[in-house]
Image (cartoon, grey):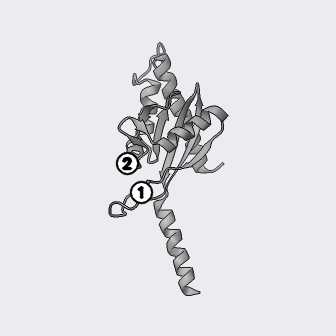
Amino acid sequence: MTLAAVVLVAIGILVLGLVSGFLVGRRAGAGSGSRAGATVADLVQRVVLSSHNGVVLLDPQGEVVLANPPARKLGLVSGSRPDERARRAAEQVRDSGQVVHVDLSPLDQGRGSGRGPTAVLGEVRPLGDDFTVVDASDESDAVRLEATRRDFVANVS
């Protein structure tokens, strides 16, 4: 299992803990002398919010429960609504129970200075109880590097 897969699994488990914390409302270590007094939900929220990937937690109706700043920067969430492609992928995940990979690249790539994300790839995973998580990363640099490599090889030939 690659490091990226391990991190994704850990984030998924932590987000599931967040959902459980919201739904159950229990304190971590309640009655056992918890030092920090933070709930599991608080800790998981901190992990999600500090992630470099865009992470969006969707409820069974496809509404945003939690989204971190990179998710907003990548365009996965607008206001309180998820990107339509991510929402449809989440429906597929809820129906099939299988992970779905989805291209979440900005649709308006012709606008702006071209400095923003141009290639956003996402993975939508089930978390149980019909909750899903969208985990997306900006692959723009890798795409630009591959285009440069292709152009170089073509020009050398």
As helix, strand or loop, the secondary structure at mark 2 comes to helix
Expressed as whole percent of the image width and height from the top left, the position of residue 3 reads 59, 50
Badge 1: residue crowd in 10 Å (few <14, some 14–19, many ≥20)? some
Residue at x-position 38% and y-position 44%: 72
Q: Residue furthest bottom?
A: 157
6 sits to left or right of 27: right
Q: Could you tell which of marks 2 and 1 lies nearer the N-terminus?
A: 2
The residues tagged by marks 2 and 1 sit, at their Cα atoms, a distance apart of 9 Å
Residue at x-position 58% and y-position 24%: 129
Expressed as whole percent of the image width and height from the top left, the position of residue 48 reads 45, 38
Expressed as whole percent of the image width and height from the top left, the position of residue 55 reads 47, 41
79 sits to left or right of 106: left
Tag 2 and tag 1, C-beta contact below 8 Å: yes
Expressed as whole percent of the image width and height from the top left, the position of residue 22 reads 46, 22
Q: Which residue lies furthest to the left in this view?
A: 112
As helix, strand or loop, the secondary structure at mark 1 comes to loop
Instruction: Inspect the image, locate mark 1, and give the three-letter code of the amino acid beneath it.
Output: Pro
Q: Name the residue under label 2.
A: 73
Above or below for 120 versus 86 = below
Q: Is residue 6 visible?
A: yes
Above or below for 69 versus 120 = above
How many numbered circles does the render carry?
2
Q: Which mark is residue 117?
A: 1
- Asked where in the image residue 27 lies, by quadrant, the reply is top left
Q: Is residue 11 visible?
A: no
Badge 2: residue crowd in 10 Å (few <14, some 14–19, many ≥20)? some
- Asked where in the image residue 157 lies, by quadrant, the reply is bottom right
Q: In front here: 53 or 62?
A: 62
Instruction: Inspect the image, locate mark 2, and give the three-letter code of the amino acid beneath it.
Output: Lys
Residue at x-position 48% and y-position 67%: 144
Q: Which mark is residue 104?
A: none
